[in-house]
Image (cartoon, coloured by chain):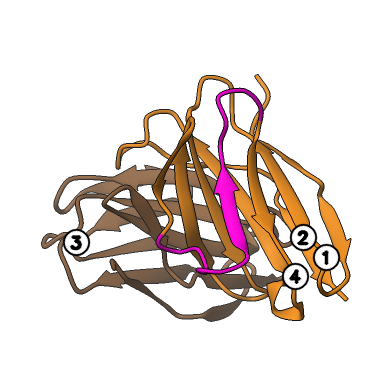
Amino acid sequence: GQQVMQIPQYQHVQEGEDFTTYCNSSTTLSNIQWYKQRPGGHPVFLIQLVKSGEVKKQKRLTFQFGEAKKNSSLHITATQTTDVGTYFCAANNFNKFYFGSGTKLNVKP
Amino acid sequence: NAGVMQNPRHLVRRRGQEARLRCSPMKGHSHVYWYRQLPEEGLKFMVYLQKENIIDESGMPKERFSAEFPKEGPSILRIQQVVRGDSAAYFCASSLSGDRNSPLHFGNGTRLTVT
């Protein structure tokens, strides 16, 4: 089935530093979604990317979809302690949403 | 507008007992997905259901696990004769249309502990 690989697995940053997580697929994706899961919480939908080369911003978060639609990234500028959590990408394949393994972000104040 | 409701939040079962996990989707949503998450791991797809139909159960273990989404009432994930390896968080998600562009709305999950 569809697999999306996500790196890094963990990232520890000082508050104010930037953070990036990457999602890669061996096959072309129709779209990609990003979710955030706070510690002890449930995944929450952040955004969806559909078009080749698409870039979307949500305040300090920038989401990109690669030109070949095989990779995506989430970049957070000037992290804050509220950004702590695990960030997942998810790809859809025949009605199923496959999630990457996630990148766990820890922000030190 | 209530979100996805899962209960119970925490469930403790002894080995060999049955676990029943319930999920009520968001109002207006008729597509339900179940995912399993082990500590520090990602979300593993288990099953996708619409009302009264199992669309895809390719992620479900062949034995002891079953799921349903009846015409009336919540979706149920049932685990028979639980073993310690079943301990995990089980998340239910619903979507409006089930197509690839429809985001998933997750419940708070059920944390199952098998003793």
Q: Colour of chain B?
A: orange
Residue B46: where, in percent of width, then height? 50, 59
Write down the residue under mark 2: B111
Placement of the N terminus of chain B among the 4 image quadrants: top right
In the rendered image, residues at marks 3 and 1 fall on the same chain: no
Q: CA distance from mark 1 to mark 4?
A: 6 Å
**Image position of B7 with respect to B4: above or below:** below
Read off the chain for label 2.
Answer: B
Mark 1 vs 4: CB contact within 8 A: yes
Q: List the residue tagged with mark 3.
A: A66
- Which element type, helix, strand or loop, lies under badge 1? loop
Q: What's the residue type where badge 2 is placed? A: Arg
Mark 4 — on which chain does it sit? B
Residue annotated with mark 1: B17
- Residue type for callout 4: Val
Disc 2 packing (10 Å; few <14; some 14–19; many ≥20): many
Q: How many marks?
A: 4
Question: Answer yes or no: do the residues labelled 2 and 3 have beta carbons within 8 Å?
Answer: no
Q: Is residue A82 left or right of residue B97?
A: right
Q: What's the magenta region?
A: B58-73
* Residue denoted by label 4: B82
Residue type of the residue flagged with mark 3:
Gly
The answer for how far apart the CA atoms under marks 2 and 4 are is 14 Å
Q: Looking at the image, is mark 2 or mark 3 nearer the viewer?
A: 2
